[in-house]
Amino acid sequence: MRHPKDMNRRQFLTRAGGAALAVPSLGAILAACSKPGETVSGSESPSDIPIATLENPVTLPMNRDPIAADTPPESGPLVLYNWADYIWKKKVNEFAEEWGVDVEITTFNNMEEGIQKVSNGQVEADVFVPTTNYLRRLVKDDLVQPLQKELVPNISSVWPSYSDPGPYYDVGWRYTVPYTIYTWGVAYRRDRVSDDEAASQGWDALWNNENAEAISLYDSYGDTIAVAILRNGSLEVNTGDEALITAAKDAILQTINENKARLTINGVYAKLPAGDFTVAESWSGDIVGAQWYLPKDVEWDVLGYWRPPNGQTMIGNDTLAIPTAAKNPRLAHEFINFFLDEEVGYDNFRYWNGYQPPFSSIDPERLIDDGVVPPNLPMAVVTEDMFKEDLTPYELVPEVDLLWQQAWTEIKAGA
Amino acid sequence: MQSGVWYPRWYWPSFTITGIVWLTVLFVLPAYVVLSVAFGAVDFEHFGQPVPYYAPWWWSFSTFNETLTQFYQGSAIYQAPLIRTFVYVSSASVICLVLGYAVAYFTARCTSKNKGLILVLLVAPLWISYLMRIYAWQGLLDAGGPLNVVLDPFGFGDTDFLSGLHITVILGLVYGYIPFMILPLYASLDRIQESLLEAGRDLGANGRQTFWRVTFPLSRPAILTGIVIVTLPMFGDYYTNDLLGSSKTSMFGNLISAQREFTGGSTRMASLVLILSVIVMVPMMYYLRETRRAAERGA
């Protein structure tokens, strides 16, 4: 009857549209969804586990029993979910050889991404490297499993604060072992800024117009806003005070606008050694690792690192944990134990990573004598006392986090 | 015209099924999910994951409204990137058009055997990943790099092109999208019949007049297509600025991508995506209207 030539384009499209509606309607699918619960709206947090702080250490509840100590080793492959370039492959290969399994390393770009993929099962990791401020929520959602301590005898390598009683965020180290420990400070080129100048300027070096066009700040809101708070003279690095946050934001915008400071993530190890930056906000592990990135004709003593005096330094650490969904939990325990081995952990640090494990056997003098930390970077060494006394970034409650996020969005929008 | 062959009513519409499935699965459903996330809630006890509200009667507009007001109220923190995006995209599109037209015209009118070679060369850069090419630009633009050396006599020897200059980001956009302008222009210019141009000349028009009165009007639909093809993705572009600019040259896309780092940022992110979609719909509507008019004129 009807031939397309009788049909103009509009009619044709109308019909096509009709056909589209005939596809099972969205409404039917939607009706099947239950109404979202009340608890999820807004930022009210019915938290049964409190946020951990140095003053209020938290013993995390045991969601389940750890695996049996005599669980036979699985056949792998072991999946490690980690930051990029954060473990020495040679040591990973040694582990793989020792246990006769393959080890796959999958990486995430930021903690948000890592957490999302672990929680929605997109990455089925055996070993995960969460920061301490996410641990409470990981346990709450039963996303990580308790450790079988009998399988981690090498915990004896770490500082007593981390093993007995265990760190404030995981008393009794039920779910985690520490992987690395680091401070926040200012990395600088000693051929342009003397040690004395760096010490007298402190954080202000990142605001100094003499360093204009050669200043780097981390492109990471938690880090840089906290540093700006310290620079402004407060020690409240977890503040919810709007005035402090606004002042920090203004300070960051000021050095961006007046001194052309840049927001980077690899500024310390990729750009400072090449001389593109004179001063940079820096994690201590980044500046120690930067020695491997120096151009051939540049001596390693051009690198310097300043951090505030004890009591005013900001210190943080990363952990190793085993997700609940791990397919190779026994191997995961062995992997964790392997990297807590004094030699393995030390080599991982000294030859590759630059991030220090909190081992009792590592003392500052040994690090410098062994040439691990260049003599020009004495302040990059982290000691156990600092972990007990210094400032630590904690998990921020949602309302406060939102203030930080807004401040950062304004910075990123280039106001 | 009746062929005498009988088709059931559903016969011709059924040909659209593949298209409809494609559109539904890859466009309508995802767009609806974005909508539901933007108008949903955030679960702060579970890593700030979005809680999409799929049913319209549950929609909550608080985050969306908050996001929207950030464009014009208070410190209006989203305004600067929005204005920047418009300026960058329009400048880059105009430059793409001028340069692209010249190249396409030359290629289409080039009668030698090298035509194929020119086309291959135009497409060749696309064989290398965009990321790699922009890294190459980083090397060229770096402080004290080749560009500084070349431009030194003109007083640009000390300019740090990567310190967040508008011109650098516009250059990056032009570089990244110009092939997509050249190809439709070439296809159109190449199809213009020689006889039409000859007719123009016969009727006494000189070269310039022939161009403006024959070639250019005939290539108008292609110009429009080219502009739409380069403009739409430019509006959402963020990596060009990530790699060549700084926070001082942030575009709309950077605003969206910055939310990724935040716990609970997905609702805001979805709201921004919606706002951007509405903005790019304006040129898209204009394009659809124009092409329909052109089709009617042609018919």
Image: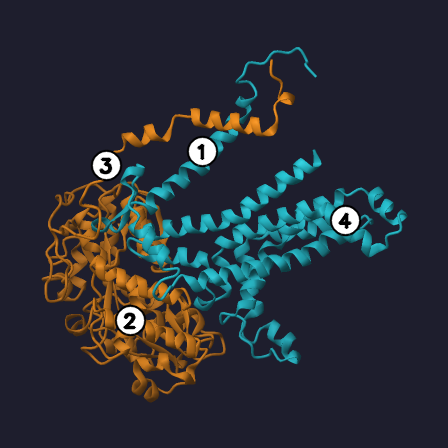
Does residue B8 appear to the left or right of A20 in the view shown?
right
Q: Secondary structure at mark 1?
A: helix
* C-alpha span from label 2 to label 3: 38 Å
Q: Which residue is mark 4?
A: B215
Q: Is B250 located above or below residue B5 in the figure?
A: below
Quadrant of residue A396 in the image?
bottom left
- Mark in front: 4 vs 2: 4
Q: Amino acid at mark 1?
A: Thr
Q: Which residue is mark 3?
A: A35
Q: Amino acid at mark 4?
A: Thr
Does residue B222 appear to the left or right of A233 in the view shown?
right
Q: Badge 2: how crowded within 10 Å, few (<14), some, or many (20+)?
A: some
The colour chain B appears in is cyan
* C-alpha span from label 4 to label 2: 58 Å
Q: Say whether residue A347 is visible.
A: no
**Chain ID at mark 2:** A
Q: Are marks 2 and 1 on the same chain?
A: no
Q: Is B221 located above or below residue A319 in the figure?
A: above
The colour chain A appears in is orange
Residue at the image position 82 percent from the left and 51 percent from the top: B210
Looking at marks 4 and 1 on the same chain, the residue that comes earlier in the sequence is marked by 1
Q: Which residue is mark 1?
A: B24
Q: Which residue is mark 2?
A: A246
**Chain ID at mark 3:** A
